[in-house]
Amino acid sequence: MEPGGDHAVADAPREKCGVVGVSLADRAAARPLYYALYALQHRGQESAGIVTHDGFQQHSHVERGLVGDAFDEDDLASLSGHTGIGHVRYPTAGSLDKSCAQPFSVSFKSGSLGLSHNGNLVNADEVRTDLEAVGHAFTSDGDTEVIAHDLARNLLEEDLVRAVKHTMNRIHGSYSLTIAHDDTVLGVRDPLGNRPLCLGELEDGYVIASESAAIDTLDGELIRDVRPGELVVLEPDGSGYDTYQLVDSGSTAHCFFEHVYFARPDSVIDDHLVYEVRRDLGAKLWEESGVEADVVMPVPDSGRAFAAGYADAANETTAAGEPRADDDDGVEFAEGLMKNRYVGRTFIMPTQDERERAVRLKLNPIRSTVEGKSVTIIDDSIVRGTTSTQLVDLVREAGAEEVHLRIGAPPIVAPCYFGIDMATRDELIAADRSVAEIREAVAADSLAYLSIDAIAETLDASRTDLCLGCVTGEYPFDVEEEATDRAVDRPSIDDVPADD
């Protein structure tokens, strides 16, 4: 168990966000940050922001909405300086107003500070109370401001590296941070590496980002992932970087759901290309629970790589694991569901009937692909079950004789408290139902999920080095009224010296 006992997080803002920071030699940072945020747009659509520093003062622009709506040419022109950080936000709880938009900026005696955060602290209320007791005033209910205030306080008394280390040992939970302290950009990953963060090299500088896809967008080269518990400090002139291993927990808690659903397929996270992971998971799904069918089709877009791997494996072996005969046509991989990309998260459905039938606005079956055939639908997950039920109905109505459902993740039985948008237990269809009961609820001819062991094997990781809280109900961080899967030994600031 972590120091401090149980921590309540149910009412805290839980962020699934994207962060980025750049330090360049001789060009403005604003536009590269803007492009990088575009590459990370899938990680947050509620607000976008950039903070830069020109060597004399800090500049900030933060606005609600998508990246393309939050900035115009004048906004980017006002963000002068060769260094800066950016953020895209999608809140899953807490305030939706601009007060929680990021990067969060503060000015204090030792300079200026900007901070972008992906993740969720489990002791934010405790730290906030302590800071308020010594005079800190807060303008939001988000945990990002808590981190910023704690770090600013430490910077009044300590050098940059030791101040960051002090804050890391004070806050508990999941976090990947990009920080701007005057014209110095930093990247920090929590000691268990729950949320992703990586380092890249550009032609004229360096970049830190949630995903390598942002580095690719800037024509950069991925150097490596930021290690759990590591601080990366970019030189203000873009000439290099320093690293400091500030905390070493001895274990990790990488979020497996980043690979299954959340990250872009073209990103490399913890040394694994997400697209290839999903294809491999699809192949394992066939090995574990393949069912003979005429057509395999994905639920767009996140089910596509799973379905491709599943279909390839199905055309190599039968469901019984025997090699396909030369005259066996195997299974057809087809795009049987077309997605309407203009129906987003904010579509308003005022009645229950409209909500239940909203999937028809987003997805439409191709009748010729499914009519008169047995069909296997591949999706990345089932959360509430509403979409799966509607999809099965749609495909049946389009003429499918059989509809089988295969899921590229284990059943989601518990909420996520650390940065992925999940429903409550009352809303999770797998929280209190068996697979057979879920199959009956979604009206599929068969249903199977991927095993946890298959996830761990594909990621070349032990189960104890993955965060599996949403599929086991046991978490790597202390959460009030939730089980903890293992003790986390978190060294104090005095135990681990800074690499000065």
Image: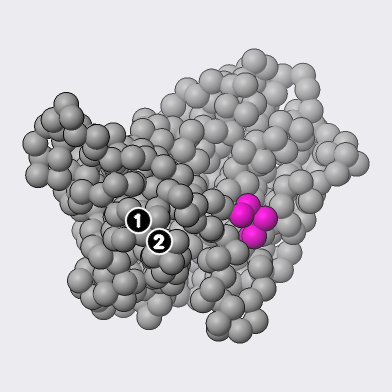
Q: Nearer the viewer, residue 478 or 472?
A: 472
Q: Which mark is residue 399?
A: 2
Q: What amino acid type should be assigned to the residue bearing mark 1?
A: Gly
Q: Which residues are magenta?
A: 340-344
Q: Which mark is residue 372?
A: 1
Rendered residue at 23%/75% (across/down): 437
Q: Nearer the viewer, residue 298 or 127?
A: 298
Residue 414 at x, y percent in the picture: 33, 69
Q: What amino acid type should be assigned to the residue bearing mark 2?
A: Gly
Q: Is residue 62 magenta?
A: no
Q: Is residue 341 magenta?
A: yes
The reply to whether discs 2 and 1 touch (Cβ–Cβ < 8 Å) is: yes
Is 60 drawn above or below residue 94 in the view shown?
A: above
Residue 190 at x, y percent in the picture: 42, 47
- Side (left or right) of 246 relative to 361: left
Q: Nearer the viewer, residue 393 or 486?
A: 393
Rendered residue at 37%/40% (across/down): 333
- Side (left or right) of 420 relative to 432: right
Residue 421 at x, y percent in the picture: 48, 62
